[in-house]
Image (cartoon, rainbow, N blue to C red):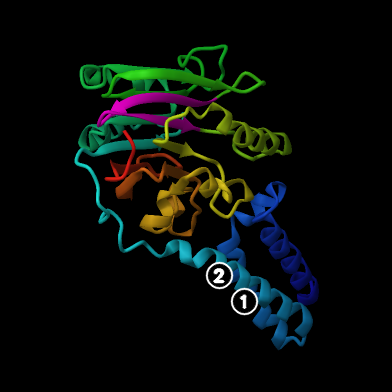
Amino acid sequence: MSIGKILIIGLLVSSFAAVGNWLVWLDSFANFQLYLAILGVGLSFTGIYKRHHICSLCLIGLSIYHFTIVIPWYIPDQNLGKELKDTGDLKILSFNVHAFNESYPDLIDYFEAEDPDILCILEGSHHLRDRMQHLHTKYPERLEASRRADVSIREVAGFILWSKHPLLEHEFIITPNNQVQAIRIIIKHQQRAVEILAIHPPSPKKFWDVYRRNQFFSELPNHFSETPHRIVIGDFNTTLNSAILRNWDQRGLRNAHLEAGLRHTWPSPLHFFGIAIDHAYVSDSFVINDYELGPFISSDHLPQEITLSFANSADL
């Protein structure tokens, strides 16, 4: 294939990525915006050398656009955890462990070492759950749900959501095709009602999956309660580049990645060259004290660990 045709293909794909920042149906291109920008620079210099100046300059322009969008996300906020806050931390651990992960001792050792207040396991199996019975006294509130609403977790892996705090309310969010894609709970922490949504929408492998994922995100706010203290955490199956997440700050939610510096969560074996599809969004009433990714434990995802406190100004 000639360099001219390669440049045209690169220009089209890079354009789709730019439009994907604003149009949800093209967000799969936008998810790889950083790598398309790097590739675009390399192709552009090759094209200039081969005297394809117009395509090369257009591709450089698109690459600069991509870089200006993405690079600021990797710069951590120097004020992380330094804001005025109330005492009393809330620690949440979220991990898509992969349905066929059999590293049970390593997983359990990790959960015990981190000792979160809320433990959210995605694609958790009954084999893992059954080996965690010794933790029942620590986590008196325990919810579970298969990805399919009509079967138990013994048949299809799904959500395992455990809490040290009493649950004031809980809801399994089920889509029209009978899939459980989120669990919503409300706990009481520091005399305030805190809403936590553990989510895992469909992976956009096929066109219909993309539609169902986009529909899930459009309907998710309908399940929000009236409390101003909210945390949405889990495997979002999309990145910050996507048009889906562009307006979440308008809902009073901010992404922990943007304060701690963007870290790639998938695929874990290629961590440095991956993308971030696992997120934690928190309301403005919280101060993020710490946000870290956990170790590789035989999953294609890395776990998220977030520690929060209420800001001094948070309403009771």
Residue 295 in view of the camera: no
Mark 1–mark 2 distance (CA, rounded to whole Å): 17 Å
User: As shown in the figure, which amino acid type bears the numbered disc 2?
Assistant: Thr
* Labelled disc at residue 42: 1
* Labelled disc at residue 270: none
Label 1, secondary structure: give it. helix
Q: Position of residue 161 (x, y in %)?
A: 38, 24
User: Which residue does the image show at 25% across and 17% down from the upper left?
Assistant: 136
Nearest to the observer: residue 51 or residue 187: 187
Asked where in the image residue 208 lies, by quadrant, the reply is top right
306 to 63, vertically: above or below:
above
Q: Is residue 237 left or right of residue 229?
A: right
The residue at which mark 2 appears reads as: 68
Q: Is residue 31 left or right of residue 76?
A: right
178 to 201, vertically: above or below:
above
> Which stretch is magenta?
181-199
Residue 84 in view of the camera: yes
Q: Is residue 223 left or right of residue 254?
A: right
Q: Identify the image quadrant of the N terminus.
A: bottom right
Q: Callout 1: few (<14), some (14-19), or many (20+) C-alpha neighbours within 10 Å?
A: some
Q: Position of residue 217 (x, y in %)?
A: 60, 36
